[in-house]
Amino acid sequence: MTATIIDGKAFAAKVREQVAGHVSRLKEEHGITPGLAVVLVGEDPASQVYVRSKGKQAVEVGMNSYEHKLDAETSEADLLALIDQLNNDPAVHGILVQLPLPAHLDSDLVINAIDPAKDVDGFHISNVGLLGTGQKSMVPCTPLGCLMMLRDHHGSLSGMNAVVVGRSNIVGKPMAQLLLGDSCTVTIAHSRTKDLPEVVRRADIVVAAVGRPEMVPGDWIKEGATVIDVGINRIDAPEKGEGKTRLVGDVAFSDASKVAGAITPVPGGVGPMTIACLLANTVTACCRANG
Ligand code: GUN
């Protein structure tokens, strides 16, 4: 079997088109332009790339983008003051603080200082609680993007066995909640899970979100399963020349795609969907704020 490639890049382009349509209607009919504020503390190169991309895509769909770059030594008090200012700014409908934060800053404290209605990452404790109890909330962007691709591919997910590998607050836990909400039988597996290969082999849906290059080999995948690879790992690629690197996922794509029914590639799978969902969440926050 050769797996269907789930094209996250094309799917994300469609989502952005829909978002752009909403943005132009909000402007024309209500005179409102959705605004997204992105806060970056420090100079982590990967975070800088993500933040630039978020700002650029926000502008491309017609939103206002407000980038706040603070130096790595910024105090917690200064960061909290900025968040307070953004919470009270009516032009800002979505606030995102790029993670990870430098070690001297308490991420939980900072995230929980964001107005939950503007928390377009869905990381605030109230949004986590709302999602966990099946209530209307802001849904974390990466798991939301994964769910959209799964629904698009399968229609109903009801009754499917889903295994989420990874238990992070950003992806693994909310992903499990979303799959449960769609009536999957959900297992969260992690580094201490016994017989991990056997657990993954039972899955109709595998979501790999561990951040370890190609950690899930092809022979862990059940024939015909759908594989969603959240990992974006940069590894050395001497075959491309000295000092060159390439991106790989958490799944060994080449082998897995011989047995899976469908699989997301890296790059071009989950990654583009994450930012598209961030833009969609910003429009949602803007609509909710304006009744
Ligand atoms: N760092 C890695 N992924 C994310 C994300 O989805 N949101 C934020 N704020 N930081 C991240």
Image (spheres, grey):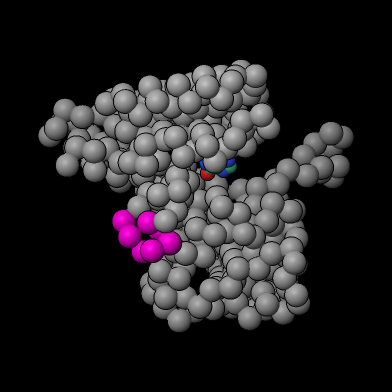
Does 97 sit left or right of 230 as displayed? left
Name the residue located 57 percent from the left edge and 37 percent from the top edge.
Answer: 107
Q: Is 133 colored magenta in this rendering?
A: yes
Q: Quadrant of residue 242?
A: top right
Q: Nearer the viewer, residue 236 or 99?
A: 99
Position of 159 with respect to 92 (left or right) is right
Residue 126: where, in percent of width, then height?
40, 49
Quadrant in which the N terminus appears: bottom right
Start and end of the magenta stretch?
A: 130-136
Residue toward you, 131 or 49: 131
Q: Quadrant of ligand 1?
A: top right
Could you tell me residue 38's position as x and y percent? 46, 29
Is residue 59 at least partly visible in the picture? no
Answer whether residue 86 is magenta in the image.
Answer: no
Check the image and name the residue furthest to the left: 29
Give the quarter of the image for residue 56.
Answer: top left
Instruction: Give the quadrant of the C terminus.
Output: top left
**How many numbered discs sit on the rendered protein?**
0
User: Could one spot residue 228 in this view of the protein?
Assistant: yes
- Give the vertical position of 142 relative to 244 (above or below): below
